Amino acid sequence: MSDRYKLRSYLPKDKQSVHQMIIEEFGHDYLDRSVWKFRKSKPIEKLGLIVLDTFHLHHEEIVASLQYWPIKIAEYNSLLLGPLVVRDHLKGKGIGSLLITSSLKMIKNSGWNFCLVSGEPYFFPKFGFKPVPENLLWPGSIERQRLQYINLRDLYLEKVSNKPLTTLPDIC
Ligand SMILES: CC(C)(COP(=O)(O)OP(=O)(O)OC[C@H]1O[C@@H](n2cnc3c(N)ncnc32)[C@H](O)[C@@H]1OP(=O)(O)O)[C@@H](O)C(=O)NCCC(=O)NCCS
């Protein structure tokens, strides 16, 4: 990835620009997706990352971002990955991969149990994401193959229970 693009932590001042980018890239309908049922509180600020285009010295522009929201899978404190958004004209340059690999370093072995994502089935497996077990319940309609997860510590979602696993938003 070119030096022109710089990764940094999300700051509160980024909120409006990130929201604007999400709407411009995904459209207003995106907010109607079932995944937003988990995003009623606030994203976890310290886990947020953004990528800046530093080409214009005095006007660095946010071109990609990644946020996490707290959820519970059964009784397990977990993370919901997303939104992950990369400006359309910059897709395929490694920016999405940089965001995922950088943030996985932060969230692995840091107290969270699982990380869940509703995302592209072609993109997430290379980082270790697997399809969720069949007993994981999801509140609303979704293309089931989008639902993927990764274990963040020595506990395996596929082994925690044979009973239905509820997924709920959590308030941090
Ligand atoms: C998924 C997404 C974040 C990837 O961002 P990105 O910056 O383009 O990612 P990268 O450039 O690091 O990698 C893209 C990879 O996907 C592959 N890819 C892209 N489109 C593909 C397709 N239609 N089918 C198969 N593979 C595809 C690329 O070949 C590349 O693979 P490689 O790393 O093996 O070369 C971006 O495409 C996006 O914003 N998608 C829509 C939103 C979304 O699904 N967000 C995630 C959940 S919130």
Image (spheres, rainbow, N blue to C red):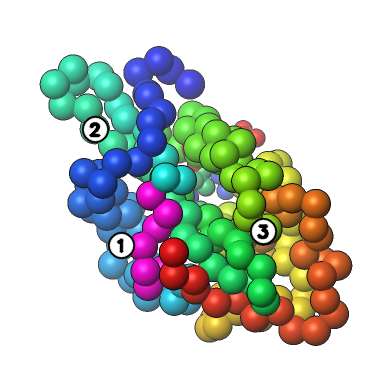
- Classify mark 3: helix, strand or loop: strand
Stretch of the chain drawn in magenta: 39-45
Residue 27: numbered disc: 1
- Residue carrying label 3: 114
Q: Is mark 2 within 8 Å of ligand 1?
A: no
Question: Where is residue 17 drawn, in percent x and y?
Answer: 22, 47
| Cα distance in 3D space between marks 2 and 3 | 32 Å
Note whether residue 146 is visible: no
In the rendered structure, are the residues bearing label 1 and label 3 in contact, judged by CB atoms less than 8 Å apart?
A: no
Between discs 1 and 3, the one toward the N terminus:
1
- Classify mark 2: helix, strand or loop: strand
Note whether residue 34 is visible: yes
- Residue carrying label 2: 61
- Disc 2 crowd, CA 10 A, few/some/many (<14, 14-19, 20+): some
Q: Is residue 145 left or right of residue 155?
A: left
Residue appearing at x 32%, y 37% in the figure: 63
| Cα distance in 3D space between marks 1 and 3 | 29 Å
Q: Nearer the viewer, residue 42 or 59?
A: 42
- Is residue 80 shown in magenta? no
Q: Amino acid at mark 2?
A: Glu
The answer to whether 98 is drawn above or below residue 45 in the figure is above
The answer to whether 99 is drawn above or below residue 117 in the figure is above
Q: Nearer the viewer, mark 1 or mark 3?
A: 3
